[in-house]
Amino acid sequence: MTTYTQLIYQIVFATRNRQRCLTAPGRYELFNYLTGVFKNKNCHLYRINGVEDHLHIVTHINPNTAISAFVKDIKMASTDFIKREKLFPNFNGWQEGFGAFSYAFCDKDRIIEYVKNQEAHHGVFRKSFKEEYIDLLNEHGITFDEKYLL
């Protein structure tokens, strides 16, 4: 017998100190690079997007991969790519930690659309990363200590 899963995650993480350094042209190069990383890890990337200080990823993760190891690998690979290609001159790395939120398959299209519209979400609605992140934590019933949400 083989293993079958349908695990939809939204993964969210920010730049170190919420530095607003991920400029639009470089973001698309980064997203294209990360698409290849996901393929190499046998994970299905549904959508990746972000703004100057954070990224959102909607993906299915291979069942043999631990989410924390996966995010660590994504952060390391993207950091190496950013430095090698000199994409974002002021980039000083990613924050410690991340958010990973699971969704039912029937919610997939709604989450993809949400991530697709990050620029408008943060531009028109002027919601900060911290406000958005707290909303996600609350939506998923996650207890948190605000001192870790710098």
Image (cartoon, helix red, strand yellow):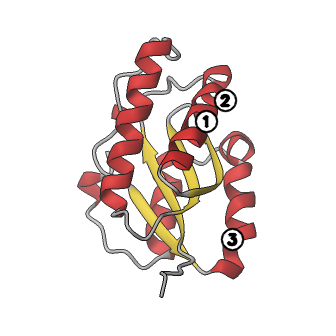
In this rendering, the answer to whether 113 lies above or below 17 is: below
Mark 1 or 3, nearer chain start: 1
Instruction: Name the amino acid type tagged 2.
Output: Tyr
Residue placed under numbered mark 1 in the picture: 31
Q: Are marks 2 and 1 in contact (CB under 8 Å)?
A: yes
Q: Position of residue 136 (x, y in %)?
A: 50, 65
Q: Which residue is mark 3?
A: 108
Q: Position of residue 137 (x, y in %)?
A: 44, 68
Residue at figure coordinates x 50%, y 27% from the top left: 20
Q: Is residue 52 visible?
A: yes
75 vs 28: above or below: below
Using the image as rendered, state which of residue 91 and residue 48 is in the foreground: 48
Mark 3 crowdedness (10 Å alpha carbons): few <14, some 14-19, many ≥20: some
**Does 119 appear above or below 97?**
above
Q: Is residue 62 above or below residue 88?
A: below
The residue pinned by badge 2 equals 28
Q: Amino acid at mark 3?
A: Lys
The single residue placed furthest to the front in the displayed view is 1
Residue 123 horizontal side relative to residue 54, left or right = right
- Considering the numbered disc 3 on the image, is that residue within a helix, a strand or a loop? helix
Viewer-nearest residue: 69 or 147: 69
Between the residue at mark 2 and the residue at mark 1, the CA separation in whole angstroms equals: 5 Å
Q: Residue at x 64, y 33 (%)?
A: 32
Q: Residue at x 50, y 23 (%)?
A: 21
For mark 2, give the secondary structure: helix
Q: Position of residue 43 (x, y in %)?
A: 53, 57
Residue 90 visible in this rendered orientation of the protein: no
Amino acid residing under circle 1: Phe
SS assignment at label 1? helix
Quadrant in which residue 27 is drawn:
top right
| Closer to the camera in the image, 100 or 79 | 79
Q: Percent from the top left, x then y, of residue 36?
A: 57, 39
